[in-house]
Amino acid sequence: MEPVRSQRKLIVNDVVSTIPLYRSAPALEVRLEEFELFALDRLRVLKGISDALSRGRKPEEMDKLAIDLWKTNMRHPQSSEVINKDIISHFVLRLVYCRTEDLRKWFLSMETALFRYRFKREKQEAQRALMAEFDLPYKAVSSSEFESVKEKLVLVSRSLGQSSPTADDIFFKVPFEEVPELVAGRRVFISKGHAYIAMSQVVSLVATQFRSHLSKALILTNRKWTTTIAEQEKDRLTPIVEALSSSYLGPDYSQPKEFAQISLKDIDDVAKSSFPLCMRHLFEKLREDHHLKHGGRMQLGLFLKGVGLKLDDALAFWKAEFSRKVGAERFDKEYSYSIRHNYGKEGKRTDYTPYSCQKIISSTPGVGDHHGCPYRNFSEENLRAALNKMGVTGRAVGDVMDKVRNRHYQLACTLTFEAVHGSSCDAGINHPNQYFSDSQKIMQFKNQSAA
């Protein structure tokens, strides 16, 4: 792969910044495999930042986490290709997330956050190089002007618990509307419509510019996508682009690992102790109605396969329930094939994998369906009742409902897990089978400790 030529190096006084500003798409050929893999690696970074912010991580924790995520996921075997991977992955995800208002909003927010974390890691000279690249018309405050406002700047620094500024420190005077977050947080001195910002605060100014440029670029990309690209690439890029926005990035749980098998005699107890709410609801509805529609059978059936229910046991389990409603003969004719199919024993013999949280959340249950995500689909009253049934009470219920109202459904499930098990889940819940696996580990540890 040739180095990207369309991105200008950010150089001021021979200082080069390592952060591209993504002004223009790279003029080079990219293999389809890299197109997707690079995008997935960047997506892991953005989603890691999103999850951590939603969980209320402290600023200093976020600084470290973001850089760790970047180093882990954005490496390349050839050091000369790291910049290409950075730029290519950004533009691929720009295509992915330009397509709806909600997607644009999320991508804009996360890319701006990533930019901020990376900018703060740059040396002061490189930061000024980036400022110059944005053509910001602001010059450093002169010594005489600094002395005239020094007392005010000292008061601001003291209120923030910082050391007092000296004549050696660099300050910029900018229109206050350019740094809204600093103004809102009362972290700057304002005089005659201008804010005096320290070099350590320049990230707010530059990030605002970055966000503005990217916001406009996403609108333009959306127009190109809808008018030409989507149709031109319908057989090649379009399916990849449309799938990436809902990509699940963790293990597929097609084969159970830690807990290789669950037996029919234990399944009811295990359902109560270790099934996430989405699967517990389906399981209980199956026991209650002796029937589930196709969506429910697929969601619960593949989950049970992933937690270690063998094919013979799965057939016996479903037949025992369905035969009470439709009879054994009809079950054998109409339903047993799809169960064997899910286990890769019929049709194309594909080894189907359990559904991830993202797939479940994005499903749209109809009347009489019970699949999908309860945190998204249940009424508040029904969700509170379901949580209470799982043993979630008091303040924990309120915390879960807060996440639901903000549409953080996976975080709501994570808080449920923590409340049920009395144990933290820092990684967050991203898959029903992960919930089961982590639950079983905790249960096993508690049983060993009690022995």
Image: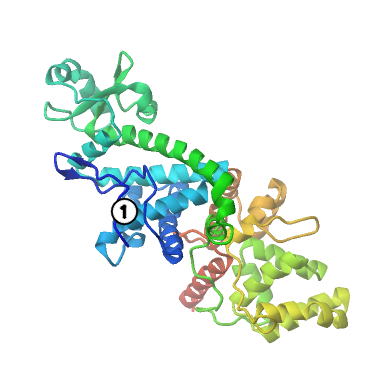
Where's residue 293, x and y in %?
78, 66
The N terminus lies in which quarter of the figure?
Answer: bottom left
Q: Vertically, is 238 above or below 401?
A: below
**Quarter occupied by residue 39:** bottom left
Give amino acid for label 1: Val
> In what element is the residue under mark 1?
loop
Q: How many marks?
A: 1
Left or right: 86 as drawn, with respect to 419: left
Q: Vertically, is 173 above or below 213?
A: above
> Residue at the location (49% across, 63% down)?
249
Residue at the disc numbered 1: 4
The answer to whether residue 228 is visible is: yes
Residue found at the very far bottom of the displayed protein: 312
Colour scheme of the rendered structure = rainbow
Where's residue 264, x and y in %?
68, 81
| Within-10-Å neighbours for mark 1: few <14, some 14–19, many 20+ | some
> Residue at the location (86% across, 79% down)?
330
Where's residue 305, x and y in %?
63, 77
Return the residue nearer the eye: 390 or 150: 150
Residue found at the very far top of the displayed protein: 192
Left or right: 296 as drawn, with respect to 257: right
Left or right: 102 as drawn, with respect to 25: right
**Quarter occupied by residue 209:** top left
